[in-house]
Structures are given as C-alpha cells and as structure tokens.
Image: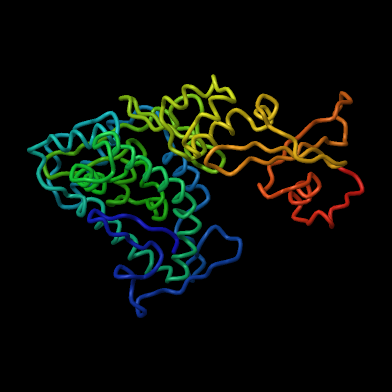
Amino acid sequence: MGGADMGADGRTMDWTSGGASGAGAGSVTAAVVEPGSDGAQLADGAAPFDLSADLARWRAWATATGPADRAGAEEGVRRAYRLAGLVEPERVVWAGSPRAAVALVRELSDRGPSVRDAVRSAPWAAARRRLHAELGPAGWSAHWAATGGQLWPSAQALVDRIRAGVIEDLAGRDTGKEAAEIRLILLDAVLGQHDAPWLAAFPAGDGPIDALSEVCRGAGWWWPFARVAVLSERPSALHRDEAGRLDHGDGPALAYPDGFALHAWRGMPVPAAFLAELSTLTPERIRAEENAELRRVMLEYYGYDRYLSDSDARPLHRDETGILWRIDLADDEPVVMVEVVNSTPEPDGTHRTYWLRVPPSTRTARAGVAWTFGLDASAYAPERQT
C-alpha cells in the first residue's frame, strides 16, 4: 500500500489498491512504468503531469511556516463550496492554530452540519477514480510512489503529533468523553497544507482539486460547515531532524502564532520544562531522572563522551584497540562504550578520540570495536586503524 488517509468517519482509505473507488477491469487503460522514471506513463507515452517539478512545490507548501495567505485561502474555500454545489459559507472565521480552531468549533452553535464529504472527500474519490482508470492498478501504485508517497510519511507523522497535542492540551488526556469529542472534530478537518501528499498526486485543473490546492498553498487545517468555515493559521516555526522527525533542543519543535506548541527531541515528545533545563544538565541530574526515555535524551544532549569524563564511569577493559567504559543507569540497561584513538593524525598533528557505543554485553575493547564492523573479536585484525 502506498499510503492511507483517514476519512471523516474515521475509516482509513486506501490510496493504491483499486477498492470501492477503483475502476473495473473493463475500464482500465494500460500503463507503462519505466525503471528509474518519475512515475507512471499512459500507454501512449504521455505523463499525467510534470511530477519532478511539482513535487518540490508541494513539499514546500506542506512545510511552509509564516502567516497564512488569508485572501487566497478564503477564495479557495468559497470556490470549493461552489464547485461542490453548495452555497458559500456565510462567514469565514480564522483561528491561530488547530488547537484554537477545535476550541472555536466546539463553541459555534450556529455552524450547521459538516460539509467535508461534499467539499473534500467526494472530489478526492472522483479524482482518484479517474486517474486510477487511466493508469491501471500498477501504474497508479507507481505514480503514487513517485508523488504523494514521497511526502506522506513525514506529513502523516506531523498530523498525528498535532492531533495528539491538541487532545492533550484541551482534554488533558487521550481517553474519556471529552477526548473522544475532540478526536472526532480533528478527524473532520480538511488538512490544508498537510493535505499536500494526496493533492500532489493529481493534475492541476480548474475543478474542486484546484480549489482545495489553493487552500493548501495558503493555510493550515480548516473545517467546512454549512454556514461557517473555520480556518487556522500555518505554524510560525517548524524544526525537524534529518529523518523528518520533530526535533529542537532550544524551544518548540512546532509552534503556532497563538502559542500552541509541540516540543520534541529527535521525534520523542518532551515537556517544555524538560528542554529548558538541558543547558544546565549535570551528571547528577541525569542519574536522578526516573524516566528512562527522558534520561536517554539527556545523555544524547549532554554527550556520552562528556558524561564519561564528568561522571563515575568505570573502565572495564583496555587493550591495543581502545578502552571499554561502562555507565550503570537505574532501571535501564547500562551504557557501554569503547574509547578509540584515530591513528591517522589531524592536520595539526593531533589524534582525535572517538567513543563508540556498543552492546551492554560487550566485555572487551576489541570485541566492541569488532562489533562496529559486524565482526567477531577473533576475526578483527586491522592492518591499520583509521
């Protein structure tokens, strides 16, 4: 499966299999997928649209920060209503974040019923059905992998974190009646910029998909109701690591202009107060932390090598390959590392020292260094260490 999308009723919709929205065998056009190409081509050699050029733009919109393009987004919303055969909303209301938008939705008594199915779900299903019929099952799967599938994992992970953060902020926990109510409102959102993965899979045009794309380019999450449309701002800051995970050691990893924020270290949610004390860490504070996951974050931030030199780490073994060190931690596996010296000198003539983390069961320095090369100690015999 190339990806999935959560519908308004909480069901997961399949992007790649034919499913209920796929075309029947009699209406499928053959597709050709060339190895190393940007995606599927129609049988006559034509591409659905310029995949490589479009993908960079969709990626930029999915991760955009800064004030929303309110005029453009509102026009996209009104056009989406019209193209769905609906009367335009009587008013468009803005909120500073998805959290504030959910709170507003809960307060609006005159909003009318949700029209998400007409505005978003129906156009999505129709566009997917048409493209699936043109490309065929294999062609559609390859096309998705080359377009939306490139953006899906990081976007969906971010969406999940925002949903969890809103529930925690408003309900205080992820279970109970209030949390369930908030979760349903969140599932009823159109995701604006975070809808970029599935929008990237469809060619541009003047129809409903283009209207939704206009909102994607200019705003964050939004909620379409019969009488009111609630739109939220984009983040004011977004920090991620090389793996695409939320990550920032100096403030929120994701922040909105109204103050709603998520804090994380290499993808792991952490309290704001926890990050604030990282710059003042000591070995004693690290050892005193009862939460094993937070203690690992502390060690990563403080640095294992620095911790070794500043704490009561004890050498277990030493030989010509290096020194094996061990740090015992309460309620967690010990940290075992090999200290090695690069035999190749730096330009200034010095030799750099490295600390290599190895399995807790390691008993000799040689075994630890060998493990980093995927070898047994008996098989490790370098002619020269570099």
On the image, the x and y values in percent for residue 65 come to 41, 31
> Is 266 on the left or on the right of 134, as rendered?
right
The outermost residue toward the left is 110
Colouring rule applied to residues = rainbow
User: Where, quadrant-wise, is the N terminus in this rendering?
Assistant: bottom left
The answer, for residue 386, to whether it is visible in the render is no
**Which image quadrant for residue 127?**
bottom left
> Is 386 on the left or on the right of 26, as rendered?
right
> Is 306 on the left or on the right of 252, as rendered?
right
User: Where, quadrant-wise, is the C terminus in this rendering?
Assistant: top right
Residue at horizontal 26%, vertical 55%?
10
Q: Which of 130 and 292 is in front in this view?
A: 292
On the image, the x and y values in percent for residue 258 come to 30, 25
Q: Is residue 205 placed above or below 313 in the rendered structure?
A: below
On the image, the x and y values in percent for residue 26 come to 35, 80
On the image, the x and y values in percent for residue 367 come to 78, 50
Q: Is residue 208 placed above or below 343 in the rendered structure?
A: below
Q: Is residue 2 placed above or below 365 in the rendered structure?
A: below
The outermost residue toward the bottom is 26
**Which image quadrant for residue 201?**
bottom left
**Which image quadrant for residue 325?**
top right
Total tally of numbered discs in the picture: 0
Residue at horizontal 55%, vertical 29%?
286
The outermost residue toward the right is 383
Q: Which of 261 and 91 is in front in this view?
A: 261
The answer, for residue 277, to whether it is visible in the render is yes
Q: Which of 235 and 201 is in front in this view?
A: 235
Residue at horizontal 46%, vertical 74%?
30
